[in-house]
Image (cartoon, rainbow, N blue to C red):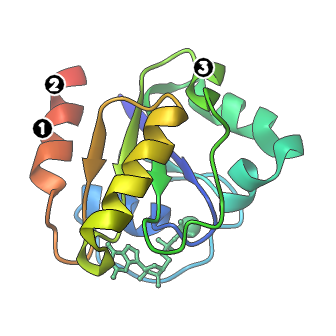
Amino acid sequence: MYIMVAGSIGCGKTTLCQRLAALPQVYVKTQTAQIIGRAIDTPGEYMENRTLWNRLAVSAVDSGLVLFLQDPVNSGFRFSPGQAAMFQVPVAGVITKLDLATADDIRRARELLTLAGAKPVFAVSSLSGEGMDKLTRYIQSLS
Ligand SMILES: Nc1nc2c(ncn2[C@@H]2O[C@H](COP(=O)(O)OP(=O)(O)O)[C@@H](O)[C@H]2O)c(=O)[nH]1
Ligand SMILES: [Mg+2]
């Protein structure tokens, strides 16, 4: 099962994909959708620019799960309410950068993801690995 990862520029998509695939974390700007292990990593522009949403929909066709990622610290970008409904597969939420976030940051991010229709919502740090076990177990339960 492929997992499509979507969210704003810099929210931590590529780093999470590398973590899920247990690959070394190397910074590369994502220019186009790419496969990392079992994850389909997408550019933040696809989510931030409505005219590119069709590319997200196309990338999701081969996926069994979509992950909406939210950076809890720099949350300038907002998912649209109910946006998860544009996909035919389950959409779960992932709050990233748990190592940098306060409890209030996490609460706000959780509200945003819930409003977008993502369920359940996880919180992880792709750097420290905190929270990754719950997310990994959830993914395994679907595949
Ligand atoms: N502290 C911290 N930084 C992170 C985490 N995940 C990603 N980052 C950093 O955030 C920046 C953007 O990450 P990247 O994965 O390229 O974001 P993308 O644009 O969504 O693919 C990079 O400098 C990463 O090292 C995390 O869990 N904790
Ligand atoms: Mg990227």
In the orientation shown, which residue stands out farthest toward the front? 104
User: Mark 2: which secondary structure?
Assistant: helix
In the rendered image, which residue does mark 2 sit on?
141
- Cα–Cα span, label 3 and label 1: 24 Å
| Vertical side of 48 occupied by 26: above or below | below
Does any portion of residue 143 appear in the rendered image?
A: no
In the orientation shown, which residue stands out farthest toward the top? 88
How dense is the environment of label 3, judged by Cα within 10 Å: few (below 14), some, or many (20 and up)?
A: few
| Vertical side of 116 occupied by 71: above or below | below
Disc nearer the start of the sequence (3/1): 3
What is the three-letter code of the residue carrying label 3?
Answer: Ala
From the viewer's side, name the closer residue of 34 and 6.
Answer: 6
- Cα–Cα span, label 2 and label 1: 6 Å
- Does the numbered disc 1 mark a residue whose Cβ is under 8 Å from ligand 1? no
Please provide percent x and percent y for residue 45.
Answer: 74, 59
| Vertical side of 54 occupied by 100: above or below | below
What is the three-letter code of the residue carrying label 1?
Answer: Arg
Does any portion of residue 54 appear in the rendered image?
A: yes
From the viewer's side, name the closer residue of 42 and 44.
Answer: 44
User: Mark 1: which secondary structure?
Assistant: helix
Residue 136 lies in quadrant: top left
Q: Which mark is residue 137?
A: 1
Q: Nearer the viewer, mark 3 or mark 2?
A: 3
Q: Residue at x 42, y 66 (%)?
A: 72
- Does the numbered disc 3 mark a residue whose Cβ is under 8 Å from ligand 1? no
Please provide percent x and percent y for residue 26.
Answer: 42, 82
Please provide percent x and percent y for residue 113.
Answer: 46, 42
Q: Residue at x 34, y 71 (%)?
A: 97
What is the three-letter code of the residue carrying label 2?
Answer: Ser
In the rendered image, which residue does mark 3 sit on?
85
